[in-house]
Amino acid sequence: MSDAAIDRVWPDPASDLDDAALLKGIAFPAGRTWLRMNFVASLDGAATRAGRSGGLGDAADRRLFDLLRWEADVILLGAGTARIEGYGGMRLSDEAVAWRTDAGLVPQPAFALVSRSLDLDPGAPIFTDAPVRPIVYTVSSAPAHRRAELADVADVVDAGDEDADGMRIRQDLAGRGLYRIHSEGGPHLFGAMLAVGAVDALHLTLAPSLEVGSAGRIARGVEAPVGAKLASVLRAGDELLLHYRLD
């Protein structure tokens, strides 16, 4: 069995799911705007190992991480997470492009960043290697000179005055025809989105480890609890890949 083999525990148990079965299980609902988040966490709630979330997942987590991008119209990310995790230009594999084309989608999803300070390098690969012009959501108080520099390589959009409003971001994306919104964090963006009820679903990989240290949780800055309903449970060895729909 491959290190990336994934079984479905619930509902409808099945072993060693192929990509088609996994894609069917994680498909966006038809006919509506949908925003989902994707995170990995340890058993004791740590969102990172040595400062990065990538250290917690294994081959199966990375497999599902990639597949979750395939159907998305746009991939949404906090600028801090993009820097920490080392994001480059958002390009899907040739296999993903072929699947998207067969499904009637554009070859590559758009890429959207959220940054209040606009402390971003317009010459970075995340912009220069992007196959689709990125979108940067910011606030009206962001530095004007940084806004002007980024305007050459991205659409710069105000989503608030001092803080970016998650619902305004969601609505602007939908207004661009980007209804299937897949977000890869980070915790501050997740918290901001939860606070305004902008998140529909969470894909959470539960890594079989106890990190113990001072790593933060997957969401920050939200005070009120948010309920969730379990939609599916996948398993890869000792790792669980959970799908929740949020109230």
Image (tube, helix red, strand yellow):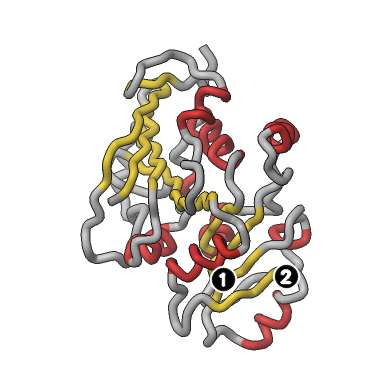
CA–CA distance in space, label 1 to label 2: 14 Å
Q: In terms of image quadrants, where is residue 134?
A: bottom right
Residue lying at 51% horizontally and 11% vertically, measured from the top left:
1
Looking at the image, residue 189 sits to the left or right of residue 10; the answer is right
Residue at the spot of label 2: 122
- Residue 214 in percent (x, y) is at 32, 55
Q: Nearer the viewer, residue 88 or 18?
A: 18
Residue at the spot of label 1: 137
Amino acid type shown at disc 1: Tyr
Q: Secondary structure at mark 2?
A: loop
Q: In terms of image quadrants, where is residue 211?
A: top left
Label 2 packing within 10 angstroms: few (<14), some (14-19), many (20+): some
The vertical placement of 114 against 68, above or below, is below
Q: Nearer the viewer, residue 134 or 238?
A: 134
Residue extending furthest toward the front: 31
Residue lying at 52% horizontally and 58% vertically, measured from the top left:
81
